[in-house]
Image (tube, helix red, strand yellow):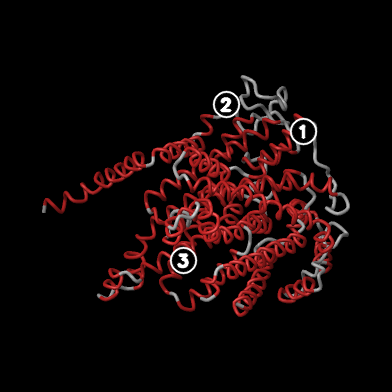
Amino acid sequence: MTTTVAQPLSVAPSRLRAILRGIRRFIRRAPFSAFWGIVAAMIVAMAIAAPAIAPYPPLKSDFRAMQKPPDEKHWFGTDQIGRDTLSRVIYGSRASLTVALGAVLCGTTLGALWGLACGYFGGRFDMASQRLIEFLQSFPDLILAMAIAMALGGGMTTVIVAIAVTRIPFGGRVIRAVVLSLKEMQYVEAARGIGASHRRLMFRHILPQCVAPYLILATTHLGVAIVIEASLGFLGVGIPPPTPTWGNMLADSLNAGLVPPWWLVLFPGAAITLTVLAFNLLGDGVRDMLDPRLRGSV
Amino acid sequence: MYSYIARRLVFGTLTVVGVSITVFVIMRILPGDPLVAIFGPEGFTKLTDKERAGYMAQLGLNDPLWLQYLSWVKSIAQGEFGHSFFRSESVADMILRRGPLTAEIALFSVVLSWLVGIPVAIVSALRPNSIADSVVRFLSILFLAVPGFWVGMLIVLALLFWFGYRAPLAGASLFSDPVANLQLVVGPAIVLGLGQAAYIARMGRSSLLEVIREDYVRTARAKGLNGRLVISLHALPNALLPVITLSGVLLGLVLAGSVPVERAFGTPGLGFAMFTAVSERDIFVMQNLVFLYAAVFVLLNILVDVTIAVLDPRIRLQ
């Protein structure tokens, strides 16, 4: 009696401890990646706490300080209508991260589930799916995202959908390959032998083994999604202005006269680079820890 | 061998057909009125119903979708590619005028990526975990993260700032005006080439590391062959196969990357035309250009597959 009551209570702390132990192991084994993981966490924190950190509102024009180079009042200078570049860069992280997370959560996940179904069922369904995925993969990423974003008209949701579609084939391919090899494993055969349903086999026995490759894929795709989002913004099919995004800011800088002011070009681009670098290196570390065999394949 | 090529070609043709349907679905059938796309939401509300009907008829948008699709395929087959909504120039003329510049950029960037990526991969793989290797690995990770168009903007800015130099704005062909042409091509080719070189160096390193451990390389060493010969004649040819495949995949990166990079440099190539089409919301030009890019990508990848099959008997005989 007492044991059944105590069990649910003891589960939570031990799981927490396991996660903490995992993180500690990660820091010890891959200090370099752990450092970049902290940078990535800081960027996420910056996006969440943007209103508290940004020195000025991102849309407020100061007509006494238009297109001013960096000084002590505006650390990153101001743009052609007097908006503070530092505040806009800080707020820009919100758009970037929301789009990247949304696109990966929708696209990579949908692709992964599709890949799971393809690998598990095989046969005609798999054949047809592989052709479809091939069509999607025949487009260079950015071009496909541009076409979808343009057809659907601008907006945050549109951009998320456009980038998510470009992520589907990768999730599909990688997870399908994993599932194909898992399906032949003895424990799956044993479960099938004692009469487990398709749903139980897929979600209880095979899906948990796909978590590691999925995590690796997702962290890599975060970086890719951020670059695509910035490119869409730069080309004018991203989230429409005046919302500050890093891509929009770079596009704006080209309208600031014949010679774009250097601070309007340097800082948003540096923010993109730093963020992508942080997520990529974190992803490398996660991959090395979870599954070194996948090195170079994802 | 020939049956392999034939099979790839048949599959490629089917893929191109599938691609054309996908493009058509995206540009025409997804929710979103083509007139809204052309005139913008504000412009669309200002149109009277009669004007709307007139434009729909003029653009052939009232026909059933399958008829619209067939007439589009026909215009592609005739090499016309339809007309821009805003310009008199046909899309085919635009491709002929601007395409060579983008093709040149793509070609130069691929050559550059090999010239930089392969030596770097060899240096890196021969002394794994040395200082040179660490530097190379960090640089290649950095280059994977930097958006090419931003580097392009910085280059344009730096040249303008310190040297007062700007690449010519008008297009120029390699044959009529090589000097102006090269000035246009060099910037984008370097930016796109270095981006690819990072991938190639990474892939080349890991593939060379794998091959060096194989028995036949050890045998070559054991019979006393010069170390340099072992690498260049025995290890490298096999290690380069995955790199060639990767190079084909990277062409997608070049084709897509050329759009923002040409915008950053102001290069009057096909990528810039795509940017213009997007900002003018010219869905007809966009539809044709997207199809062209995807079709070129498919064809180039068939070319890469066939090259691999020629070079590697293991694949040819499968």
Say what amino acid the circle numbered 3 marks.
Answer: Gly
Label 3 crowd (10 A; few <14 / some 14-19 / many >=20) = many
Instruction: Give the percent coordinates (x, y) of residue A39.
Output: 47, 36
Identify the residue position indicated by label 1 in the image.
Answer: B160
Q: Position of residue A224 (x, y in %)?
A: 55, 50
- Which residue is pictured at 25% across the width and 75% down the height? A194
Residue type pointed to by label 2:
Pro
In this rendering, position of residue A123 left or right of residue A146: left
Taking depth in this image into account, of B178 and A158 the one nearest to the observer is B178
Quick check: do tags 2 and 1 share a chain?
no
Question: The disc numbered 2 marks a residue on which chain?
Answer: A
Residue on which the image places disc 2:
A55
Which chain hosts label 1? B
Q: What element carries label 2?
A: loop
Q: How crowded is mark 1: few (under 14 residues within 10 Å), some or many (20 or more)?
A: some
Spatial separation of the CA atoms under disc 3 and disc 1? 50 Å
* Residue pictured at 69% horizontal, 66% vertical: B295
